[in-house]
Image (cartoon, rainbow, N blue to C red):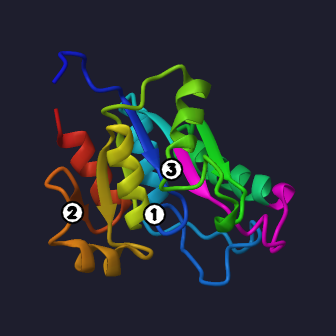
Amino acid sequence: MSDTPAPKLVILDRDGVINADADDYIKSADEWIPLPGSIDAIAALSRAGYLIAVATNQSGIARGFFDEYALAQMHDKLCGLVEDAGGHIAVICYCPHHPDADCACRKPKTGLLRQIAAELGEEVRGAWLVGDHEKDVQMALAAGCRPLLVRSGKGAGFADRLSGHLLPATQVVDDLAAAARLILATP
């Protein structure tokens, strides 16, 4: 283990962590609804000095359910709400590809994390990564991040199913607000 301190970086999945998820995809800014406490949690982390990044699979683009302009509107809404709460999102990286495309950026591959590192000029190893899916945990572990699985979104089913299989490094909390409290309380 190195003596290098962990970066003050928190990487968040989007759907099911920050906003309500939908089986038929979130297709517009009107459909993008933040989960209770998520915006305040992001703002609290930001005010505490953490860089906030979002890493999200958005195959709805490749499937033709929405386009990159609609996605930009969703992300503008997210960033605006966080800024109104006194925080800031440093970067949002997304994979627009279909799951069958075998691209380097679709979770659980680590391409989104490499994009985040390049955009921010920050090392992701040691950063917190909060997600609601097994793929988020797999990506975090592959990149040396500190995974936090939330039960919001699809996380409840994964947390229960994976409880015996998650590595000890993976902590499970109820939602992003609980994740933020844990991160802020951890030296």
Q: Pointers 3 and 1 in contact (CB under 8 A)?
A: no
In the rendered image, which residue does mark 3 sit on? 109
For badge 2, the amino acid type reads Leu
Marks 2 and 1 sit apart, C-alpha to C-alpha, by 19 Å
Q: Please provide percent x and percent y for residue 17.
A: 45, 63
Task: Magenta stretch: give its range.
Answer: 54-70
For badge 3, the amino acid type reads Lys
Please tell me whether residue 68 belongs to the stretch shown in magenta: yes
Q: Please provide percent x and percent y for residue 164.
A: 14, 72
Disc sitting over residue 118 in the figure: none
Q: Is residue 57 above or below residue 146?
A: below
Work out whether residue 79 or residue 143 is closer to the camera in this orientation and state it: 143
In the rendered image, which residue does mark 2 sit on? 166
For badge 1, the amino acid type reads Val
Please report whichever mark, 3 or 2, sits nearer to the chain's N-terminal start: 3
Please report whichever mark, 2 or 1, sits nearer to the chain's N-terminal start: 1
Disc sitting over residue 17 in the figure: 1
Q: Quadrant of residue 151?
A: bottom left
Q: Is residue 25 above or below residue 130?
A: below
Q: Secondary structure at mark 1?
A: loop
Please tell me whether residue 185 belongs to the stretch shown in magenta: no
Disc 3 crowd rating (10 Å Cα; few below 14, some 14-19, many 20+) is some
Q: Is residue 86 visible?
A: no
Q: Please provide percent x and percent y for residue 52.
A: 48, 38
Marks 3 and 1 sit apart, C-alpha to C-alpha, by 19 Å
> Taking 22 as reference, is 48 left or right?
left
Q: Is residue 94 above or below residue 127?
A: below
